[in-house]
Image (spheres, rainbow, N blue to C red):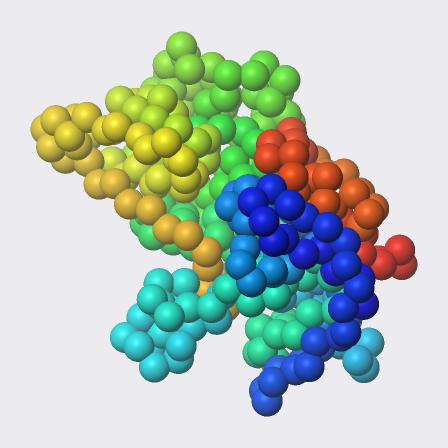
Amino acid sequence: MRAVQVSAPGRARIVELPDPEPAPGEVLVRVEAAAVCATDLKFTARGSDPARIPGHEIAGRLADGTAVGVHPDIGCGVCSWCKKGLTNRCTRRISIGLDRDGGFADVVAVPSEHAVPLDGLPTSVAPLLEPLACCLHAVGLTGAGRGDPALVVGAGPMGILCMWALRSVGVRVAVCQRSAERRLLAAELGADAVLAPDGDVGEALGAEPRVAIVTAPGGEALAWATAHIAVGGVVHVFAGSPDGALVDANDVHYRHLCMLGSTGSTLADYRRALELASSRTIDLEALPRKFLPFESLPHVLAARSKGKVKELIRVKDSTQ
């Protein structure tokens, strides 16, 4: 099979490998489409020893032709977090595409329960279920509910998905973004209000936001959200910040703020993402995206910069 393998820092190349051998309880998925995540870029920049195939936003088919999406976070199954269904908090978690070979290949082996039948959702769209599941998980942690005013900082692909995740539970959402082009896109895709960083989010929403989800990396975006959230509000640190991010502890202390974060999702989150996408409650096909050939993957991974749209890879030309 063809696979893109990461070895030394910044080095990704296409190699020919034998098809993986599924362990007991696993199935083989013939990959049709995969999406590129910022995590894949960071993984490639760090390098991997031993060499590893990345890719955790995946969809394809089982041997019998069943179309499936892949949930990548595999818990140990016995710890207290796993028993609560929070496998993404398991300290012994194994993540497909990070801790074991992933889906930037013709074939990937996955635990059978993590190969989720798509029930008619096209495999060309299904790689977006994984990032949507991460957004749904984050929204669930904030306690956001119907009618709450909320803020998303950043209108990249993850910002749009978080906006849709909030709206799916009846929340009114303002999106803050520097770029006028991206503000316009957020408005077209369903934001209740959009604003630049010098705007008044309370005026835009009619009330100060009770919840903020920060999808833009770095300390500046986080500090802006913290300063513009209502007293007693919740700030979710959704984006990583490689160089760290300073937060004014006095702001948190005197304004009774709650700060939290999460990474990944649970299998239940993934199934919920599929339900919302299949019903078109969230129209994943509306997310700006572009398809690239498999052969472009090494260059995309080594470029170390995210595009303005979600980049998907056609692993097989006949994705439906």
Q: Residue 262's spot in the image, x, y percent?
A: 37, 51
218 vs 154, nearest the viewer: 218
Q: Is residue 84 above or below residue 180?
A: below
* x and y, in percent, of residue 108 in the image: 69, 70
Quadrant of the snapshot with the N terminus: bottom right
The answer to which image quadrant residue 252 occupies is top left
Observer able to see residue 191: yes
Q: Position of residue 307 (x, y in %)?
A: 65, 32
Task: Report the residue at 48% width, 48% height from top.
Answer: 135
Residue 136 x, y percent position in the rendering: 47, 52
At a point 46% along the width and 23% down the height, the residue shown is 176
- For this view, does 64 lie left or right of residue 113? right
Instruction: Judge from the rendering whether residue 240 lies leftward or rightward of residue 318; answer left or right.
Output: left
Q: In which quarter of the image is residue 114?
A: bottom right
The structure residue drawn at horizontal position 80% and vertical position 64%, both measured from the top left corner, is: 16
Q: Which residue is drawn at 25% across and 36% down?
A: 233
Quadrant in which the C terminus is drawn: bottom right
Q: Is residue 26 above or below residue 194?
A: below
- Against 206, is 166 above or below? below
Q: In this view, does 315 lie above or below 230?
A: below
Between 172 and 305, the one lying in front of the other is: 305
